[in-house]
């Protein structure tokens, strides 16, 4: 759906995107992660046709966003920034306007599906942050896009608003729409994305499923155990589990072979005639891996 090769974009002396390669497959939810100023928005703007690359190629559904702008309109749905709509425009007017721009009829079904009927006569400025995001999503879907591009879709939303938007994005994806989103929210990337790319200084430094990216890190899984009788003496490695320490009644190990390590620990507990009181397995998080990757790439 998206093929970007050696994309470079400069703003004066600043190289925002520096030879970036990226491929987004049809039907997937793809997440762009990266620190502030890494070049995520610039990359999205190049594929939306809003910016011209200095070099490299960008293809969206086989089209060049600058050359084939009109044709691309039929394939692409872009979520507006909050400053893109005039304050006094009514939600219904905005939907009509965007429908006319796409040359498609006003879609009552879309309004019903997102249950925003009550907002139709409200002015944009009267909407809450969550309502604005929802309206932006509806506007991005008006043209029935094959590719939906979202830049930080849930930034600043409360837990409920974020969960609602996640559900909507999942259901959009289930209907076959490819979703490309930029986010700073690691949990969002883990929960929503089939694949992610971490961008640092205008380049993709890591790409894969969230599980692959996390598993490739240096961190090991933590295993914490509390038993009824405290039968396992502190200080011992158990099979594939490396003993770390004891705290608040818990023994802690780290391991890369989690299933093997836990099985061995539980077998020891049983042999000692003890009973498991609590067992916690904390896998390395995407956030930990993200920090590792960004720190390494910035050195
Ligand atoms: N219009 C512009 N004029 C000049 N420099 C810009 C412009 N837009 C972005 N930049 C610079 O380009 C670099 C990349 O910015 P970009 O907005 O693409 O990053 P980002 O990854 O989206 O960042 P954030 O996570 O903070 O939104 C930054 O150094 C930024 O200051």
Image (spheres, rainbow, N blue to C red):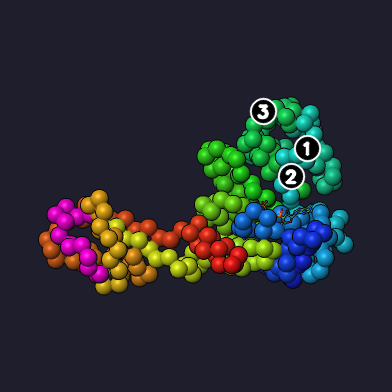
> Does the magenta segment cover residue 81?
no
Evaluate if marks 2 and 1 touch, with contact meaning CB atoms under 8 Å apart: yes
For numbered disc 1, what is the local secondary structure?
Answer: loop
Start-end of magenta stretch: 226-238
Q: How crowded is mark 3: few (under 14 residues within 10 Å), some or many (20 or more)?
A: few
For numbered disc 2, what is the local secondary structure?
Answer: loop
Q: In which quarter of the image is residue 236?
A: bottom left
For numbered disc 3, what is the local secondary structure?
Answer: helix
- Residue holding disc 1: 85
- Which of the two discs, 2 and 1, labels the residue nearer the N terminus? 2
- Residue holding disc 3: 118
Q: Secondary structure of the magenta portion, mostly?
A: loop
Q: How crowded is mark 2: few (under 14 residues within 10 Å), some or many (20 or more)?
A: some
Q: How crowded is mark 1: few (under 14 residues within 10 Å), some or many (20 or more)?
A: some
Asked whether residue 207 is in view, the answer is no
Q: Is residue 28 above or below residue 188?
A: below
Q: Mark 3 or 1, which is nearer the eye?
A: 1
- Which of the two discs, 2 and 3, labels the residue nearer the N terminus? 2
Q: Position of residue 31 (x, y in %)?
A: 61, 58
- Residue holding disc 2: 80
Quadrant including the N terminus: bottom right
Q: Mark 2 or 3, which is nearer the eye?
A: 2
Left or right for 16, reference 54:
left
Q: Position of residue 131 (x, y in %)?
A: 65, 35
Q: In which quarter of the image is residue 125?
A: top right
Q: Residue at x 43, y 65 (%)?
A: 219
Left or right for 210, reference 181:
left
Report, in whole angstroms, how far the alpha carbon at label 2 lies from the one at label 3: 21 Å
Q: Which residue is drawn at 58% across and 39% down?
A: 157
Q: Where is residue 66 in the image (x, y as percent from the top left)?
A: 85, 60
């Amino acid at each position: 759906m998206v093929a970007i090769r050696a994309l470079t974009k400069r703003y004066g002396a600043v190289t925002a995107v520096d030879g970036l390669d990226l491929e987004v497959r049809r039907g997937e939810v793809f997440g762009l992660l990266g620190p502030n100023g890494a070049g995520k928005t610039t990359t999205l703007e190049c594929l939306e046709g809003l910016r011209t690359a200095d070099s490299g190629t960008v293809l969206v559904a086989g089209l060049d966003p600058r050359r084939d702008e009109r044709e691309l309109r039929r394939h692409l749905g872009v979520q507006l920034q909050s400053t893109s709509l005039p304050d006094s425009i009514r939600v219904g007017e905005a939907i009509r306007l965007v429908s006319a721009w796409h040359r498609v009829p006003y879609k009552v079904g879309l309004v019903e599906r997102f249950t925003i009927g009550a907002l139709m006569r409200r002015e944009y400025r009267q909407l809450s942050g969550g309502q604005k995001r929802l309206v932006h999503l509806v506007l991005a879907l008006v043209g029935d896009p094959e590719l939906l591009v979202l830049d930080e879709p849930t930034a600043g939303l409360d837990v409920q608003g974020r969960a609602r938007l996640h559900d909507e994005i999942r259901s959009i994806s289930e209907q076959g729409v490819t979703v490309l989103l930029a986010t700073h929210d690691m949990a969002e990337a883990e929960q929503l994305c089939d694949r992610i790319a971490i961008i640092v200084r205008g380049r993709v430094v890591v790409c894969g499923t969230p599980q692959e990216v996390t598993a490739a890190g240096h961190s090991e899984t933590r295993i914490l155990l509390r038993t009824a009788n405290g039968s396992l003496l502190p200080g011992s490695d158990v099979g594939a589990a490396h003993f770390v320490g004891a705290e608040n009644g818990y023994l802690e190990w780290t391991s890369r072979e989690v299933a093997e390590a836990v099985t061995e620990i539980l077998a020891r507990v049983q042999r000692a005639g003890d009973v498991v009181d609590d067992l916690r397995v904390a896998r390395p998080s995407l956030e930990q891996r993200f920090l590792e990757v960004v720190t390494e790439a910035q050195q």
